[in-house]
Image: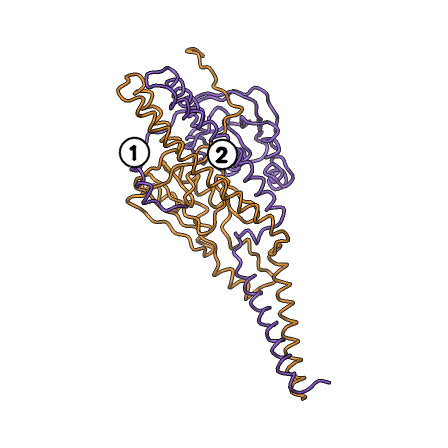
Amino acid sequence: MLKLKSWPLSLTVVFLVLGLLLSLQFRTQRLLASSLEAQKTTDLITMWKNLSTKRNQLQGEIAQLQQQLFTLKTNSSQSSEAETSMEKEMARLQMNTGLAAVKGPGITVTITGDAPLLYYDLVDLVNELWASGAEAIAVNDHRISAYTIISDQQDGPRNYITIDGQRLLYPIVIKAIGDPQTLDKGLTFTGGLIDNLNNLYKIYPIVKKEQDLQLPATSLPAWHYAKPAPPPAPAGDQNGK
Amino acid sequence: MRRIYLSLLIISIFSGLLVAWQWRSHLATAAQTNQDPGLIDIIHALEKEDASLENSIADLRQQIDSLQKKHSQGAGRLTETQKEIDNLRLTAGLVAVTGPGITVTLDDNSAGAEAAQKSSPATYKPDDYIIHDKNVLYMVNELKAAGAEAIAVNGQRIVANSDIRCVGTVIMVNSTRLAPPYIIQAIGNPDKLEAAALGAEEFVFLKSRDFPVKVNKNDSLTLPAYNGGFPLDHARPLPTGGQQ
């Protein structure tokens, strides 16, 4: 049945398959660990959720900005409405930056000093709260701004955590304003931050939902190096994204 | 004829080995293949949408800014308010800024990963050779502590409510997906920032593990504005009386 002539053909097929396999192998090896294709389905779903949340947030911001723009456009320069709109923006910015004291619902995270908490853990907790949609955060009575310094200092054999150079005393109470349910879930899900603190370091923060939290204001450092960048080149010169 | 059988045998063994190799590397790198390409498409679409929304936000903020300036010009009281808003926007990260500073580059240790894969594939852990979200988060924290006035990671400006986290092995800043190398730019006193970066635990650790990481001083950096939102659905201003 098999003629000698068909051998080259089958060999070709075999080598083709081999070549494909080899290239597939190298493709797999070279896949960047950070590429989407390298992620588990569950992680992709998380990413999808994060992106949707972000979209909603951005749409909210756009709606608010459009409102503001509309007010500015439809009112003459001397009108009180233009002024009110500016005052509103000012109030918002003061809350965002931590310059204004705020109140609202949210959660508290209480850490008693039974197990050593590192300042990295506190950085993680604050970061995780922002990631879970916190609108304002304070640790004990330090309002967290973009410029808050979380660090530590040595005191004999033990280190203690400092915020803006001031020693942080136990119990550490973190207050975060936002949707209590979402904030709580963001910290306490299985495999989440609190879970890790429990299992790895025997630290047991107590998370409590609150209806009325009050967070103090902070002051911001003066800048010595950064200046507003000159306005971007006219639209024609800009490369589209 | 015999020779052909022999070569076929060799080829079969070879391909068998290849398949085994492929399968093993598959397991080692966890879920390298993704069962759902549709999901990836959705993510790409959402990323595009979010990026265009951010563009609209930047655009709207610019329009508002110029209209406000027109309104408040020469209008006494409003000029003061305008000044305050300008300052607030600057500190909030809503304005692109320029100044001296440093650039910290953190990259995956691909060379190390390749070597380890070859020499000891059985114990090779991809996680040991990539930059993690904590590396970036703690580095940013040390730069803040060293007085950085503005920070950006791969063009994402760090603001008060910025978060740095990972989903799977992807690092996300401001919920935007980043890819290595991670370039952290910070404006401030270059000497102070450089010392802080070089002395940071993260940096020393990565360096000791042969990660390609470096710190450069810059005379002039320009960091982009933050084009995201500041959610404010629950927080209300707390009326502050004159007395305690």
Location of residue A22 in the rendering, given as x and y in whole percent from the top left corner: 57, 69
Q: Is residue B98 left or right of residue A169?
A: left
Q: Nearer the viewer, residue B191 or B7?
A: B7
Q: Nearer the viewer, residue A176 or B81?
A: B81
1 and 2 marks on the same chain:
yes
Mark 2: which secondary structure? helix
Q: Hey, what amino acid is under mark 1? A: His
Q: Residue at x 61, y 25 (%)?
A: A209
Q: Is residue B113 above or below residue B160?
A: below
Residue picked out by circle 1 = A224
Pick the quarter of the image with the N terminus of chain A.
Answer: bottom right
* Whether residue A111 is visible: yes
Q: Is residue A133 left or right of residue B16?
A: left
Residue picked out by circle 2 = A58
**Which chain can be seen in purple?**
A
Toward which corner of the image does residue A204 lie, by quadrant? top right
Mark 1 / mark 2, whichever is N-terminal: 2
Q: Which mark is residue A198?
A: none
From the viewer's perspective, is the residue at label 1 or at label 2 nearer? 2
Residue found at the very far front of the displayed protein: A74
Mark 1: which secondary structure? loop
**Chain B, which colour?**
orange
Residue neighbourhood size for the residue with mark 2, other residues' Cα within 10 Å, grouped as few (<14), some (14–19), many (≥20): many
